[in-house]
Amino acid sequence: MSKDQFVVALDIGSSKISCVVANLDGSRISVIGAHTGESKGIKSGVVNNIDKAVSSINDVINKAEMMSGQAISRVVVTISGTHIESLNSRGVVAVSGQNSEINADDISRVNDAAQALSLPSSREIVHVLPREYVVDRQKGISDPSGMTGIRLEVEANIIHGSTTAIKNLVKCVQQIGIEVDQLAYSGLSSAEAVLTDTEKELGTILIDIGGGTMDLIIYSSGRPAYSAVLPIGGQDITNDLAIGLRALLEDAEKVKVRLSDYEEFSSKAVIIDKNGREAKIPKGELYVGDLNFGMDSVPISVLNEIIYKRLEEAFKFVKIYVKKAGFADKLPAGVVLTGGTSMIPGIENIAEDIFRLPVRVGKPSGIIGLADQIQTPSHSAVIGALKYVSSTIQESGRTNGRRNGTIMGINERIKSFFKSFLP
Ligand SMILES: Nc1ncnc2c1ncn2[C@@H]1O[C@H](COP(=O)(O)OP(=O)(O)OP(=O)(O)O)[C@@H](O)[C@H]1O
Ligand SMILES: [Mg+2]
């Protein structure tokens, strides 16, 4: 009989905080509770006011506990911010197992060897993501366990971040009496929720465009190859609209979100024309009569122009990063957009104009239970964090079934990592 594991993911974004409570049974992720609330004290993905951040995290956790009927004591937390960077590293060890058979200990040692980097003390490793193993001269091995060889090498993508930013994030969660079991880069998490295996294999870039950041992750040959975070998001578009329309920020935000179903708003609205008669909103205009604009409607073309300019600039920045990372001609599966800002209508066309690649908007999938409200692009990172934990547990379960030690290995590493944050 299978035994469920209770797992909680917490996504602390610049616009919202989401907590999803789930039971894992193998690869089945069954959501039993979720809550999303306003985020305060977070700017461009990083804590900038501990008290405000703690209070908003606490509120979201309390509501998620109430909804799920479960007390939350440990969470996996997503991490973002421009301090996140990645690099590729190699590790080499001699195979120690009996009959030169590669075992979990060899794999753990070679992954550790890949981490032996000379990172400054201000940097902390968040993920060690093996890209391929090489056994003697045989390349392209995804899982070398059980193979025979003398020399085991790994090429790994290492995602690292600022020690201070990581400490402050962990501290906010610990202050409400909750332990951080694991950190997951939000770009990696979103990719887990949104990308197909084919996209990962062929080469693709995932861009999670949230409120304050664009989390980038490039996959090639099935594995993460490059990550970076840019400090641009939907809040910049809202600011531009507020300036362009001389509107309050909260009205500009409403206008931006309203564009997703402008027909609904504009077709139902009835206005009074200059002859005092009831009239419809002219075609191509968005109804704003209920906001503080002093007019009934604004041309959608004007809004689109403002939005286009900001997104064009943002995607051009991404293109520079992709080129610098050496992937300019290596993304045949194109671009996948997710995050709240990917809900802007027509965003695919803007991205296609800039990247000249196929573009799609990705929604998170692969969960059951109370999934309805959270299967939106805004929740890709929190759902992906659950999928990431689930695959980590399955991976260690598989390895542990063959031989002892791997679960301990992972748990010990996570424990020792977080020990460094304890007072
Ligand atoms: N329908 C919509 N149309 C346009 N923008 C939208 C829509 N819904 C949400 N957004 C925007 O999405 C952004 C929030 O996205 P998301 O929830 O992914 O951010 P976050 O995870 O809190 O932030 P970040 O990841 O940048 O730290 C906000 O700027 C919001 O205005
Ligand atoms: Mg986000």
Image: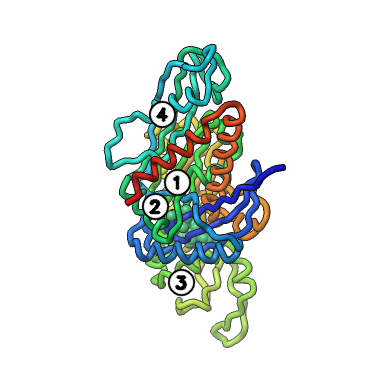
Viewer-nearest of discs 3 and 4: 4
The label shown at residue 111 is: none
| Tags 3 and 4 touching, CB below 8 Å | no
The image shows residue 243 at horizontal and vertical percentages of 37, 66
Q: Which residue is mark 2?
A: 170
Of callouts 1 and 3, the N-terminal one? 1
What SS does tag 4 mark?
helix
Compared across the picture, whether 243 is left or right of 131 comes to left
| Tags 2 and 1 touching, CB below 8 Å | yes
Q: Amino acid at mark 3?
A: Asp
The image shows residue 66 at horizontal and vertical percentages of 57, 66
Of callouts 2 and 4, the N-terminal one? 4
Of callouts 2 and 1, the N-terminal one? 2
Of callouts 3 and 4, the N-terminal one? 4
Closer to us: 239 or 305: 239
Would you say residue 384 is visible in this rendering? Answer: yes
Distance of mark 3 from mark 4, alpha carbons? 51 Å
Q: Is residue 286 above or below residue 337?
A: below
Q: Which residue is mark 1?
A: 183
Residue drawn at x 45%, y 68% as measured from the top left: 252
Viewer-nearest of discs 1 and 3: 1
| Tags 2 and 3 touching, CB below 8 Å | no
Mark 3 nearby-residue class (10 Å; few <14, some 14–19, many ≥20) = some
Closer to us: 160 or 247: 160
